[in-house]
Amino acid sequence: MSRPDSFAANLRETFRRDQVFGPLRPGTRPVSPGHLDTGGKHILYMEDVTVSFDGFKALNDLTLYIEPGELRCIIGPNGAGKSTMMDVITGKTRPDTGVCYFGQTLDLTAMSETDIATAGIGRKFQKPTVFPEHTALENLELATAGPKGTWHALLKPVTGEQRDWMASTLDTVGLLGERDRLAGALSHGQKQWLEIAMVLMQKPELLLVDEPIAGMTRQEVERTAELLQGLAGEHSVMVVEHDMEFIRSIANTVTVLHQGSVLAESSMQQVQNDPRVIEVYLGESV
Ligand SMILES: Nc1ncnc2c1ncn2[C@@H]1O[C@H](COP(=O)(O)OP(=O)(O)OP(=O)(O)O)[C@@H](O)[C@H]1O
Ligand SMILES: [Mg+2]
């Protein structure tokens, strides 16, 4: 008699998700930032994740782990599934099959986008979405706006502790001197950094950054490289980017996606000499 599929799936999960034979209690409750259970080895677990759009597999049995504090670079040709992977992690897209856990107990496939953000996963989209009519500092206040909305956030008195936190975050992204400038008057690169600062307001343990340097000057690119490297350690950072020079300048571990699966995962040097990777880039210099 063959075993039911669910039995096989459960068995596989028990053996793979954290490779610890303890009671694993999936949970879907939001947790406050800083209270994530990372008792295991990884902060993010994606196993055998498949996402289909009308039968086309944008993700195909994708398995990937992220360590606490690491800076992980994700590369891959157009359509490889990079943004879809971030959509799954942030709850925007639900996988057809597979496992996606944040820490030991948070099943991301069963959580709302808001709860995932509250639990400590922040995402910086490619296009900056700052509030141009407000100052850099006010943008950070707005980023802390809860369900009561933006006016409430601006009218609410800011405590000394919050003010210090906002100032130190602006300092981290190199914008302390611009705190009172309108966001609309900032350069493209500065707007991108301001948006990173806004995401940092939610104190994410895992920061997802999709194509951060598009349209930046070379100087801004260098500053962004330093910024992301500085954020790693305190945060886990996942960066998707096409610019190989940039990736080379920041990469520790590089994951190459191709047709929705991991094609290779190692140091940048190993990846760029991997014949399979060279083949999918069709001779582009990796
Ligand atoms: N909502 C959707 N409906 C249908 N197909 C989709 C949808 N979202 C993504 N796809 C398809 O899934 C595949 C993976 O797309 P995805 O955006 O994840 O790739 P990517 O690696 O981020 O590419 P790029 O480097 O161009 O940003 C593509 O073929 C894309 O057309
Ligand atoms: Mg994309």
Image (tube, rainbow, N blue to C red):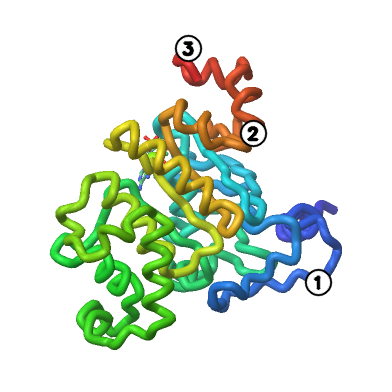
Q: Is the CB atom of the residue marked by disc 2 within 8 angstroms of ligand 1's nearest atom?
A: no
For the point 29% across and 58% down, which residue is it?
177
Task: Please say whether residue 222 is visible from this viewpoint.
Answer: yes
Ligand 2 is found in which quarter of the picture? Answer: top left
Residue 81 pos. (x, y %): 46, 39
Residue 49 pos. (x, y %): 58, 49
Give the distance between the C-alpha atoms of the residues marked 3 and 2, in whole angstroms.
19 Å
Q: Secondary structure at mark 1?
A: loop
Q: Which residue is mark 1?
A: 23
Amino acid type, mark 1: Pro
The tag earlier along the polypeptide, 3 or 2, is: 2
Nearest the eye: 256 or 122: 122
Task: Please say whether residue 55 is visible from this viewpoint.
Answer: no
**Quadrant position of residue 78:** top left
Amino acid type, mark 3: Gly
For the point 64% across and 58% down, which residue is it?
43
For the point 23% across and 77% down, which residue is it?
150
As drawn, 120 above or below 227: below
* Mark in front: 1 vs 2: 2
* Mark in front: 1 vs 3: 3
Q: Which mark is residue 265?
A: 2
Nearest the eye: 208 or 132: 132
Q: Which mark is residue 101?
A: none
Give the distance between the C-alpha atoms of the residues marked 1 and 2, in whole angstroms.
30 Å
Residue 268 pos. (x, y %): 60, 28
Q: Secondary structure at mark 3?
A: loop
The answer to whether mark 1 and mark 2 are in CB contact below 8 A is: no
